Image: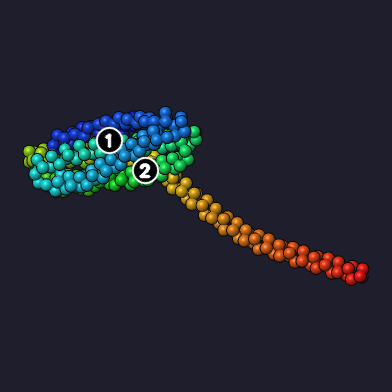
Amino acid sequence: MNDRLGELTGGGGGGSSVAPFEIAIDINDNGDGGGGGGGGGAGFMEGFFDKVNAVKKDIDAVKKACTDLDTLTQQATLTSSATVEADAKSQINTTIANTNNRVAHAKGLLQAMREETEAMKKDPSRAKPSEVRVRENLQNTLTRKFVDLAKDYQNRQNKYKTSVKKKAERQILAVKPSATEEELTTVFEQEDGVQRVMEAAILQQGDPVEVTHVLEEVKDTYHDVRRLEASILELHKMFMDLALLVDRQGEMLDQIEYQVKSASDYVKDANTDIAHAIDSSKKIRKRQCCMIIIVLVIIAIIVLVIYVMGS
């Protein structure tokens, strides 16, 4: 399965760039198909656990990236050094590109695992029910953890986007203090927004050198924001189907819980009925014993009377 999240291209701050997503998910049927023909076995489960471990590594990598993004965001937006800022932005772009590949890889593995398990459920000869349950439980756990982490990763990118926009706004206000909220918003919403605001700043301030310098920096920031927005959007699209899967799994768990509760109620009712049946059975046997004793007594009396009369 080959899965592409999208492409983040172009130059970031300081000449750095976010490379395109290069995702080649190697999901070989490590016994998943061949081992299944013989009624399951260790082969396909070993391949399954290889995928589980791969997803766990991807999750750990994304978790580390979230922490790194926080640190790099502070360096890129709070420093006064152009060199430090450029280096931090370059690292951020690299981190985002690598992490997006990790996220896409994990998503592809989870989808492949789910498809394999569904195929096994339709063909019981491929796996034992207990093995299918093991697969489903691990898939559900990993999917929920992955979706939660993907949302956290998306939030970190949003945080970085907000920070660079605020820094760009401060730079604009430094050369054009009278810039309105609408003008600042236009900078990041329209392609020529930066140019128009900077031209107005030159007319107002009269120092084209300083304004031009700020213009170039804000243009870089504009492109950074655009790439981030594209990354966030593609990331959102990518894990939405997994989020829907988690919701469906939750509904299934609710149904299972309901069925278990209903079964428990049925068992309680059945136990009550059995107890009543046992009591009734005891009473019937007691009555039968009494009737047998009475009949035996009557027979004994009749025999005794006949014996006495014969004598």
| SS category of the residue bearing label 2 | helix
x, y (%) of residue 216?
13, 37
Quarter of the image for the C terminus: give it. Answer: bottom right
State whether residue 290 is above or below residue 203: below
Q: Residue 102, percent across and down?
A: 28, 37
Mark earlier in primary sequence (2, 1):
1
Residue occupied by mark 1: 101
Using the image as rendered, state which of residue 132 and residue 68 is in the foreground.
Answer: 132
Dot 2 amino acid type: Thr
Mark 2 and 1 residues: CB-CB less than 8 Å, in contact?
Answer: no
Front disc: 2 or 1: 2
- Residue 157: image x %, image y %? 25, 44
Q: Nearer the viewer, residue 282 or 86?
A: 282
User: Which residue is nearer to you in this view: 25 or 278?
Assistant: 278
Residue depicted at 54% across the width and 55% down the height: 264
Q: Residue at x 39, y 40 (%)?
A: 241
Label 2 to label 1: alpha-carbon separation:
17 Å
**Image label count:** 2
Q: Which residue is mark 2?
A: 143
